């Protein structure tokens, strides 16, 4: 049994589609109801009449028709020559048939002599009405369209009733009404005090409450704040609209089905209007019935009366008028569909009137549905368009973001980084909270995995901002914000997730000193599209590129000749062309990391001002070209680490100005004695090699401060090592040492000592002389500490300072 609740749900489901029914659909509905009433009325009359036909026997036939003696007498009188002859009285007709015989004759004459149209007229009207009704509702219940229409109606109702829709429309109205008022006020201020009009203009453009509005008696557009529940509901609607648009715009099934059903209606109208008026003449009051039932009644011809003829004629004529109205309306709807471009829907008028100028045009079924909704009420499309606008969606996200990220919460995220700068790192947010610009102490702003970030003009409040990091995010900069960044930003780090080009606003940062680009940057973008952009970076001193390039982009060597540091991490791809490096004569630091180099490029030897060279993670096996480094008089730091170098040539001794040498993570087995002619060396790293001993000549490195031979096969340390009195950091871990020389006490400046991973059994008590050595910087097994004298162990334990 169907409950009232189920009936109510069914009625609500049917009534919800009224949004998609234009006026002609409503008109069809009412015409169909009247047609149905005509069919029901005609059928009821036909069923309730006990005798539809009333038949009497014909006693006299004249000219093959049933007649009465009066006609015979009248005919004989007309032929008489004597006009004075009186007319005889008509003969009395006696019908002496039984009642059952009359019923039998009525039934037989109804079945055999009554025309089929007069007989089945109510059923024809009912059949036509049902076909019209089915055509009108077929597209609403067809499997391929019903779910989409139901989904659209549900979303449309939510969009219409959403508080966010009301808020967005009210803001638009408020801005349109407030703009003339604020403009007139600014003119008054200009004439009275001479203030600049730019200030007022900027206030009008900002999406924040304006103090002048409240005093004018006008509510600020953003004075009302959506609660969390309303904001989440609006966000859910945005997602539903996006998915629905993506699914429906690809097809035009609804359009084609609606068009087909209108064509069927027009064809049906033509058929009905063709045969119904013709057969209407067959509905007559009198019917001459000639049947061979003389054996039962004694008569052969009967005269019958169709009692419903007159009312059926009226109903049929009325029905024809209804069909004509229905057909004309169907023809108009067909003309509307064929004339109009219903597969495209433009919000051009709304874009001009509202501030949401990015409302996209839609197509196919989505466009057709919106056209139908417009026929019902254009307000639905206007409210729905709010949820198609990215500006509207971003604004909603911004409101929710501002409510979630308060000033207090953002302050708790402030940290001091390794450069002792105050940094704010925001990770995986929906945008940039406006409250960020209240933290004027920020020096470094780091944005990571934020899909869409927009820097407004309020970024100028961050007066201490000097460094900006944008990792896997899309950043859009307003023109006023760009002017601020152009003057204040010194360091910019950009990291891309996908293949993309450098944003154009980067090349407006004329005071930028350091630029770090990491990700899939195409070489042709650097060499062709952005030639003029790099030329504007006059103050750029450091450029870091992490990508897969086949050659150093020409834009760097030609347009940045004043560059002082170039770092290129090629992520393992082979860097082939390096000849254009010769043009960068002012280069002081060069890093060619993971470039799959097999030899040191000769073009490097032309960089006379080079101070530092880093060839980390290449495929270097020999460094015979090291002799050419003697021409680089300013070279002080050479990093050949993380390669496959097997030996160091003796020519290394020619690099008399070398101060730092990185040879760790190679395959070196022996050290040439000429290495110790580099007396200016204060940093020497030989870790992760295959060394078995250290030459005694190491004592000539009198300036050595850092010495590392971690993870080698050294069994004994030379006494000459302890003649390096300036040594501060000594890393000897993971070797084969069995003892530590007592001469270690002759290193007064030693602050860091690593011995873990050896075969030591005791520690020399002379460690007491190393007054600068702290326990936290003595890396050794715990059991070895017990071998030290108690005063030495206590002193080390009491010194817990970090290295």
Image (spheres, rainbow, N blue to C red):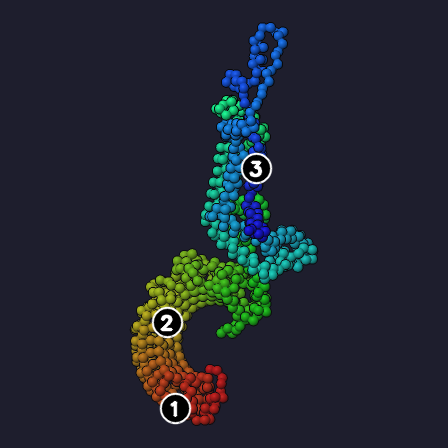
Residue where numbered disc 3 is placed: 40
Residue where numbered disc 2 is placed: 616
Whole-Å distance between the Cαs marked 2 and 1? 38 Å
Q: Are marks 3 and 1 in contact (CB under 8 Å)?
A: no
Whole-Å distance between the Cαs marked 3 and 1? 115 Å
At numbered mark 1, what does the secondary structure look like: helix, strand or loop?
A: loop
Q: Earlier in the sequence, mark 2 or mark 1?
A: 2
**Numbered mark located on residue 123 in the image:** none
Q: Label 2: how many residues lie within 10 Å, few (<14), some (14-19) or many (20+)?
A: many
Q: Nearer the viewer, residue 351 or 703?
A: 351
Q: Quadrant of residue 635?
A: bottom left
Question: What x and y, as percent, mark residue 382?
Answer: 57, 49
Let me know if residue 709 appears in the view: no
Name the side, left or right, on which 230 lies relative to 115.
Answer: right
Whole-Å distance between the Cαs marked 3 and 2? 94 Å
Name the side, left or right, on which 760 lies relative to 796.
Answer: left
Q: Quadrant of residue 673?
A: bottom left
Q: Nearer the viewer, residue 139 or 107?
A: 107
Residue where numbered disc 1 is placed: 762
Question: What x and y, as percent, mark residue 289?
Answer: 51, 24
Depth-wise, is mark 3 or mark 2 nearer the camera?
3
Q: Label 1: how many residues lie within 10 Å, few (<14), some (14-19) or many (20+)?
A: some
């Amino acid at each position: 049994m169907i409950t009232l609740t189920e009936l109510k749900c069914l009625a609500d489901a049917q009534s919800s589609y009224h949004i998609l029914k234009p006026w002609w659909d409503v008109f069809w509905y009412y015409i169909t109801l009247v047609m149905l009433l005509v069919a029901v009325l005609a059928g009821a009359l036909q069923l309730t009449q006990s005798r539809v036909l009333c038949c009497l026997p014909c006693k006299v036939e004249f000219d093959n028709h049933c007649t009465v003696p009066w006609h015979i007498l009248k005919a004989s009188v007309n032929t008489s020559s004597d006009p004075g002859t009186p007319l005889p009285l008509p003969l009395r007709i006696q019908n002496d048939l039984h009642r059952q015989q009359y019923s039998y004759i009525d039934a037989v004459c109804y079945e055999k002599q009554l025309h089929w149209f007069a007989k089945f007229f109510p059923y024809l009207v009912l059949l036509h009405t049902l076909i019209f009704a089915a055509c009108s509702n077929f597209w609403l219940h067809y499997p391929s369209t019903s779910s989409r229409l139901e989904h659209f109606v549900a979303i449309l109702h939510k969009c219409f009733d959403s508080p966010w829709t009301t808020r967005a429309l009210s803001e638009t109205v408020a801005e349109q009404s407030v703009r003339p008022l604020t403009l007139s006020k600014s003119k008054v201020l200009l004439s009275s005090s001479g203030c600049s009009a730019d200030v007022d203009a900027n206030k009008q453009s900002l999406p924040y409450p304006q103090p002048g509005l409240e005093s004018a008696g006008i509510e600020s557009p953003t004075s009302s704040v959506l609660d969390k529940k309303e904001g989440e509901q609006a966000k859910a609607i945005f997602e539903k609209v996006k998915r629905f648009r993506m699914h429906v715009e690809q097809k035009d099934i609804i359009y084609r089905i609606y068009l087909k059903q209108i064509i069927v209606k027009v064809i049906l109208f033509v058929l009905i209007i063709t045969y119904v008026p013709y057969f209407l003449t067959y509905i007559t009051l009198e019917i001459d019935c000639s049947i061979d039932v003389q054996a039962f009644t004694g008569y052969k011809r009967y005269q019958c009366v169709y009692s419903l003829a007159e009312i059926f004629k009226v109903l049929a004529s009325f029905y024809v008028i209804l069909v004509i109205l229905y057909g004309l309306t169907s023809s108009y709807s067909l003309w509307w569909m064929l004339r109009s471009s219903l597969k495209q829907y433009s919000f051009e008028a709304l874009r001009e009137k509202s501030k949401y100028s990015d409302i996209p045009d839609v197509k196919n079924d989505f466009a057709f549905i919106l056209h139908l909704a417009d026929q019902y009420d254009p307000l639905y499309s206007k409210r729905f368009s709010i949820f198609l606008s990215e500006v509207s969606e971003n604004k909603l996200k911004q409101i929710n973001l501002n409510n979630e990220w308060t000033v207090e919460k953002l302050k708790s995220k402030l940290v001091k980084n390794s450069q002792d700068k105050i940094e704010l790192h925001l990770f995986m947010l929906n945008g940039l909270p406006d409250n960020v610009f209240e933290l004027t102490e920020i020096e470094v702003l780091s944005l990571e995995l934020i899909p869409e970030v927009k820097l407004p003009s309020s970024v100028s409040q961050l007066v201490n901002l000097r460094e900006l990091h944008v990792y896997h995010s899309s950043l859009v900069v307003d023109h006023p914000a760009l002017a601020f960044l152009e003057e204040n930003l010194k360091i910019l780090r950009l990291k891309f997730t996908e293949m993309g080009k450098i944003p154009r606003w980067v090349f407006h940062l004329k005071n930028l000193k350091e630029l770090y680009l990491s990700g899939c940057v195409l070489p042709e973008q650097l060499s062709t599209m952005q030639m003029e952009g790099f030329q504007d970076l006059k103050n750029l001193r450091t450029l870091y590129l992490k990508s897969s390039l086949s050659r150093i982009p020409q834009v760097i060597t030609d347009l940045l000749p004043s560059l002082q540091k170039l770092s290129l991490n090629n992520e393992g791809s082979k860097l082939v062309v390096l000849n254009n490096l010769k043009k960068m004569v002012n280069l002081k630091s060069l890093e060619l990391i993971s470039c799959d180099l097999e030899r040191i490029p000769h073009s490097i030897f032309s960089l006379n001002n080079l101070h530092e060279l880093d060839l980390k993670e290449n495929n270097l096996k020999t460094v015979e070209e090291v002799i050419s480094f003697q021409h680089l008089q300013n070279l002080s730091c050479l990093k050949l680490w993380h390669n496959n170098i097997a030996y160091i040539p003796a020519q290394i001794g020619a690099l008399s100005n070398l101060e730092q040498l990185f040879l760790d993570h190679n395959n070196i087995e022996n050290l040439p004695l000429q290495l110790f002619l580099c007396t200016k060396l204060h940093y020497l790293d030989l870790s992760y090699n295959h060394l078995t001993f250290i030459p005694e000549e190491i004592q000539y490195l009198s300036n050595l401060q850092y010495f590392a031979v971690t993870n080698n096969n050294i069994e004994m340390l030379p006494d000459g090592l302890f003649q390096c009195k300036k040594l501060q950091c000594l890393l000897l871990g993971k070797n084969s040492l069995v003892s530590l020389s007592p001469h270690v006490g002759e290193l007064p400046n030693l602050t860091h000592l690593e011995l873990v991973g050896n075969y030591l059994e005791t520690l020399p008590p002379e460690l007491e002389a190393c007054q600068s050595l702290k326990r936290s910087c003595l890396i050794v097994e715990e059991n070895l500490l017990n071998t030290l004298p108690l005063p030495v162990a206590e002193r080390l334990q009491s010194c817990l300072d970090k290295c």
